Image (cartoon, rainbow, N blue to C red):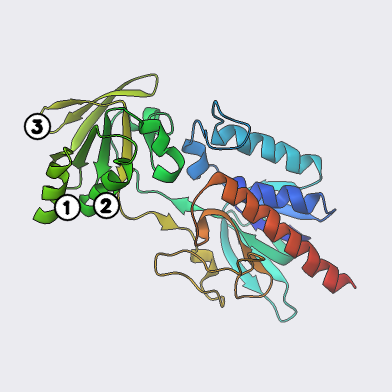
Amino acid sequence: MRVEYDTVIVGGGIAGLQTAIQLARCLRRVAVIDMPGGRSTVAKAYRNILGFSEGVSGDFLRQVGREQAQKYGASFITDEVTKLATDESGLFSVGTKNGIHTLTSRTLVLATGIRDPFPRIPGFTDCVGTSIFLCPDCDGYETVEKDTAIIGAGQHAVSMADELSYYTNKLTVINHAKVQVDTHALYGLTQRGILYREEEVCALHHASGQLQEIVLSSGERLSAERAFLAFPGAHALTELLRGFTVRIHEKGHIYTNPRTKETDHPNIWAVGDINEHSQQVSIAMGDGTQAAIWIQKRLREYET
């Protein structure tokens, strides 16, 4: 099936949905191609978003965002994009994994997000997004005066402890990956009263997602109300842009025009966590709106 759109959006997370809503309200033919999953699906209670002081889940935002975009005419396809190409006229061709869908569009938006290196620990899935967090900018507040563990790898875990010490002095660093930490850093933890363990976490005991206890490989049990992950290897999903003239940061994020969110390749925009900025839901929404405004301007240029 070959369909032509004004814009194809690859990724149906928060940034992709906001882009779709704005463009559909501009009366544009918009298709969103998305696979289940993504970082926002593990967030069970965003509490730093205007109007949601009691928290709102990523799943809820995605559900209502999809409904809102469809209300204005956006199309949704559940599939995985495997190929992007462009022809001499500048039209984009978007191919999907199952081979049924091949779409063409004048403009393209990448909203593919980030894949996190989650550990395989019993109890983790129940707790992540409720009492186990990833981002201290988003959820450092959740640790205020609470027993908090940092589960991670070497210096990454030590650095996370530095950030969280602003919120609580009840910290334990668990070097789950057993990556060597220099003696100076260990001494700094001791001086601040931060406990340190170089052991694997075997299990997380909880009550309905509320962390209560961490079991280490030695058999030691640590009381904890909150935990943060601190592992390297979060991966920005930018592989689809290989072969295009797009600058990519050494950590894998995409450079875009800060005013328009357009990449160096004409008519390709990037929004959300694949961009080089703080990974926040409110910023992802802003990216989507900002990109859509400039996509509309570009499409109007072609039409006039």
Given residues 258 and 268, the one toward you in this image is 258
Q: Are marks 1 and 2 in contact (CB under 8 Å)?
A: yes
| Residue corresponding to mark 3 | 218
**Residue 65 placement (x, y as % from top left):** 68, 39
Taking 194 as reference, is 303 left or right?
right
The residue type indicated by label 2 comes to: His
Labels 2 and 3: the sequence-earlier one? 2
- What element does badge 1 sit on? loop
Mark 3 Cα-neighbour bin, 10 Å: few <14, some 14–19, many ≥20: few
> In the image, is residue 32 above or below residue 46?
below
Quarter of the image with the N terminus is bottom right
**Element assignment for label 3:** loop
- Residue 182's quadrant in the figure? bottom left
Which residue is identified by label 1? 179
Please tell me whether mark 2 or mark 3 is closer to you in this view: 2
- The percent coordinates of residue 181 (x first, y second) are 14, 53
| Residue sitting at x 64%, y 35% | 63
Instruction: Name the mark on residue 156.
Output: 2
Q: Say which amino acid is labelled 3.
A: Ser
11 over 213 or under it: above or below: below
